[in-house]
Amino acid sequence: MNPKTVIELLVRSHELARRFALLALDAAHAATPIADDIGGIANISVGALGQIDVWVDSTDADSSQSVRDALQANSVAFRNIDADDGSTSLVGRINGTDWLRIHVDDQNGLHLQVETGAVFRF
């Protein structure tokens, strides 16, 4: 599925965005379970979206795990961000701070980015 189409669907359903982010992070952790840094390409399947390749941008394992925990606890509030060029991304907020971003890059690649320093206890 086209990454821009995926973003459009995630924008319409933040629950789908939550599941998408959780699956992408789970796949990244499974690929490098004992690494200090987590990242790489993940091929995931979310409901009717089918198989999707998503780049999980490199971040430290503790931050990534904390965001995974927040996603599992349904403690991430997503909001849509529209750019001047007409593109849309989603930002996930935890405890009042933005820690997660889902976007399409200039080469039409779908990315999930976790900010470094996100460490939460649930």
Image: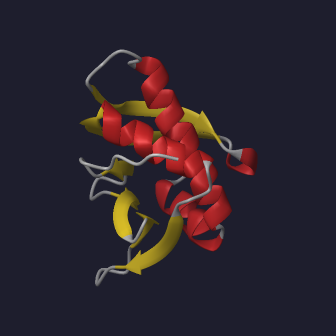
Which of the 4 quarters of the picture holds residue 39? top left
As displayed, is residue 23 above or below residue 36?
A: below
Residue 42 visible, this angle: yes
Q: Where is residue 42 shown, x and y percent of the image?
A: 47, 32
Q: Left or right of 37: which side holds 53? A: right
Q: How many marks?
A: 0
Q: Residue at x 39, y 71 (%)?
A: 96
Given the current orientation, which residue lies at the most extreme bottom position? 84
The residue drawn where x is 52% and y is 61% is: 76
Q: Nearer the viewer, residue 26 or 82?
A: 26
Q: Nearer the viewer, residue 117 or 39?
A: 117
In the rendered image, the residue lying farthest to the top is: 34
Q: Say which residue appears at 33% left-offset and 42% top-offset.
A: 63
Which quadrant would residue 11 be assigned to in this image?
Answer: bottom right
Q: Is residue 101 left or right of residue 71?
A: left
Q: Is residue 63 above or below residue 81?
A: above
Q: Position of residue 102 (x, y in %)?
A: 42, 58
